Image: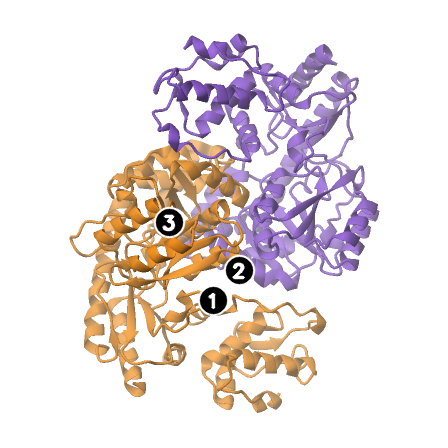
Chain colours: A orange, B purple
Amino acid sequence: MSEIFNIKLDKSSDTPLYRQLSDKILELIECRTLKPTEKLPPVRKLSEELGVSLVTAINAYKFLENKKILYSQVGSGTYVSSITINDLPEPIPKAGFQIHETIEFNFKNAINFAKSSPNANLFPVDEFKLIFNNVLERDKGDAFSYQDAQGYPPLREALVSYLLDFGIKTSEERIQVISGAQQGIDILSKAMLSSNDVVFVEKPTFYGAIGAFLSRNAQVIEIELESDGMNVEKLESYLRIYNPKFIYLMPYYQTPTCISYSIKKKNKILALAQKYNTYIIEEDNQCEFTYSNEKIIPLKALDYKNRVIYIKSFSKILMPGLRLGFMVLPKKIIENVTNAKYVTDISTSGFIQRAFTEYLQGNDFKKHVSKMKEIYKNRYEATIRVIDKYLLQYVDYKKPDGGVNLWLSFKKNVDVNKICEELLFHRIIVTPGDIFSKDDHSFNSIKISFADLECKDIEIGIQKIGEYLCTVM
Amino acid sequence: MSEIFNIKLDKSSDTPLYRQLSDKILELIECRTLKPTEKLPPVRKLSEELGVSLVTAINAYKFLENKKILYSQVGSGTYVSSITINDLPEPIPKAGFQIHETIEFNFKNAINFAKSSPNANLFPVDEFKLIFNNVLERDKGDAFSYQDAQGYPPLREALVSYLLDFGIKTSEERIQVISGAQQGIDILSKAMLSSNDVVFVEKPTFYGAIGAFLSRNAQVIEIELESDGMNVEKLESYLRIYNPKFIYLMPYYQTPTCISYSIKKKNKILALAQKYNTYIIEEDNQCEFTYSNEKIIPLKALDYKNRVIYIKSFSKILMPGLRLGFMVLPKKIIENVTNAKYVTDISTSGFIQRAFTEYLQGNDFKKHVSKMKEIYKNRYEATIRVIDKYLLQYVDYKKPDGGVNLWLSFKKNVDVNKICEELLFHRIIVTPGDIFSKDDHSFNSIKISFADLECKDIEIGIQKIGEYLCTVM
């Protein structure tokens, strides 16, 4: 096994270290120096012996595990699989995202600033238990029959009322129920995009959306965000050249930058969409969590020309595992979208839709949102307090007055990925900025979320980040 | 309103009557002869006045309702919307499917031979109620956290055991959990197909699969089915020309023809997939319901070269509203498929996965399958008995000895769609053969299913079909 410790890596190479390492391990397997079922050294030992970071070693193992070249046994270690070498799969383009996700799962005891959904112990489980029972008593087997692809009609009606609180007036026939925001983006891509169609997105933006657009072979064009929204001059100059099928954006507490759009920019972008005959996909997953007294005005509430497709998910507000959200659609695209939903998965679970209808119509939903908002507001205030205390000499950031994330930009140019890797040593997880763009990986920023952390852990974590930055900046 | 009764339709035209009728109604609306909020005549009266079938009138109204040009109020009637005419949407290519689906929903009191999932009163609702409670007691909020995109690990382990009963040996890392078979097909399309890639399908085959492939701009090539499976000479001759990404097929109780593949053809097709380096997507949704003593051998059980992607849905066996199924994947494509699942909807509901794991591991699942099999066997026998009694002079059919459908081919050339429309007058719903092909609409056959019908209704329905056919053949 000692051959593995003789691996030499080239730190100046363009190939990431973990890929160099995984390639070298693969060579050792291919030449049978490492044999099937043989145990590999623990990641910590490997990282020390090779002088690479822990996360490089982890990622190299994970990469080979994903390809089933290695396998790991909980509490025991990592082993070489008994596979046929000539049966190896193709390289996977999106390995970066996957590995990033995996890291989050591998550090259960770390302070996790990467998770932006609430802790499971805050979910309204007891309320749902009661509702599930009531729904099954009332609807019996019908709760598990095929459901209309557009969604359970009483839920669509309840959502119409719910939207009035945000100034959005619509009708139930414009609502399409979906299994979460990501599915909404995927279905819209299917309904609206063909190969080489153009879409505009914010830069930076949520990688899951980029993935869905690229999977339809769309051309994704990124437009810089400013502190009050997309750069509208750039937007218009691009609109003159390209003919995008839609512009995807998040006007409140944008992922990852946490900026919100000014009313002026909202109106300008709506006017541009009308002028250049395109649609806007507005994603909203955190509007409920505003900590100032300013009124929330979604783009959809200003949309008199039917240019906005509004996507709402309840993953961050309620619980991600519900897999439920909805879209408000302009009339012209409803039928295409419902057809796309049908070929995607026929329909969203009627049982979950029925339960959520009850929940939304009772008092529990509003009570839950108030409770979560209070908790998040406390965490938000705790976070900015300790950032101001420990990090202000290293980072700049805006206070978004809402949402569950903060976007910290380093004052000096740093190797953000290296910082994120090194922080893992200290059992702190943050999200590097570079995964929020299609191909520009130069963001000198990290995203941190306080959604799943108690105030005391927030303070410990931010303090540790400060102590670490002090040694490198 | 009487102008609507003066509409003239051209029965010799290639344009379907309902589209001619909807176009004429639209003209009346556009020239304000029919005014916003004006009530339209009832469909029965319209069909009598114009001398067209009831279903033509219904479809014309439904077509305009889908476009929001008309709207209907339950118990009151159909009205002209107050819409802006120049805001009318584009025609929808897949209107045929939609309308067919709609018909099923509009005849709740008819004898419905089109529905192939069980009646809601046969669903194991009480068992699931108990399990939902237990799962929430045990896992609390974790049941609603984000779930691994590949699926809840204990469910994947339980599925490995379950598959052993069908001679399929696999491991949990090869299993991808999905929200039903349609999602499986959609995700595979996303993971494996680019524009103009070729896929082979059976002719006829399930229209939802064709829809998913076409939505990726794939070239769909249809290969004739014989009584023991796909025409393998034709398959090989096409394999010499094309390079399909996969061959999609259902080796048992195929939809819609109900044929099953001979072991010889299964082995031949596996060998061809290996020789020509392609994959086979095997969909199985009714293997449990075999009424003979012959052993069920899925293609996947014979798949020593890892050429088969096995898709299993529990919609027909258990309840469609569960939205749960799984795939067994060749090693090479796992990572791409899991990435495609992630961009599609992140993951299938962890709560439903947890509940189904409990159900599958207890005795209830096997008991339920036995019960359903006995019920279906009775219905199957009742159906073939009355077909042999009432329909043999009009149709040919094979007895599949399994599944929930029968495929009846008319002895004489008939207008199948007209027959299906006319049967609706008699409150009998059957599925016309022509929706099961991409562009060949010449199938002289209908599909009937006995899944949701009591034996007495089966006899009444088949007898009525016989009486009707007697008047036209």
Within 10 Å of disc 2 (Cα), the crowding (few <14, some 14-19, many 20+) is: many
How far is mark 1 from mark 2, CA to CA? 9 Å
Pinpoint residue A42: horizontal percent, then vertical percent: 52, 82
Q: Residue at x 57, y 58 (%)?
A: B337
In the displayed structure, B447 sits above or below A212; it is above
Q: Which amino acid type is marked by label 3?
A: Ile
Disc 3 element: strand
Residue that badge 2 annotates = B339
Q: Residue at x 67, y 85 (%)?
A: A33
Residue that badge 3 annotates = A281
Disc 2 element: helix
Residue that badge 1 annotates = A97
Marks 1 and 2 belong to one chain: no
Pointer 1 with pointer 3, Cβ within 8 A = no
Outermost front residue: A240
Marks 3 and 2 belong to one chain: no
Q: What number is the disc on residue A425?
A: none
Outermost left residue: A293
User: Is residue B347 visible to the viewer in this orientation of the structure?
Assistant: no
Pointer 1 with pointer 2, Cβ within 8 A = yes
Q: Which amino acid type is marked by label 2?
A: Asn
Pinpoint residue B197: horizontal percent, then vertical percent: 65, 53
Q: Chain of mark 2?
A: B
User: Is residue B466 visible to the viewer in this orientation of the structure?
Assistant: yes
Q: Residue at x 63, y 51 (%)?
A: B196
Quadrant containing the C terminus of chain B in the rendered view: top right
Disc 1 element: helix
Quadrant containing the N terminus of chain B in the rendered view: top left
Q: Residue at x 35, y 54 (%)?
A: A249
Drawn side of residue B397 relative to residue A334, left or right: right
Q: Which amino acid type is marked by label 1?
A: Phe
How far is mark 1 from mark 3, CA to CA? 23 Å
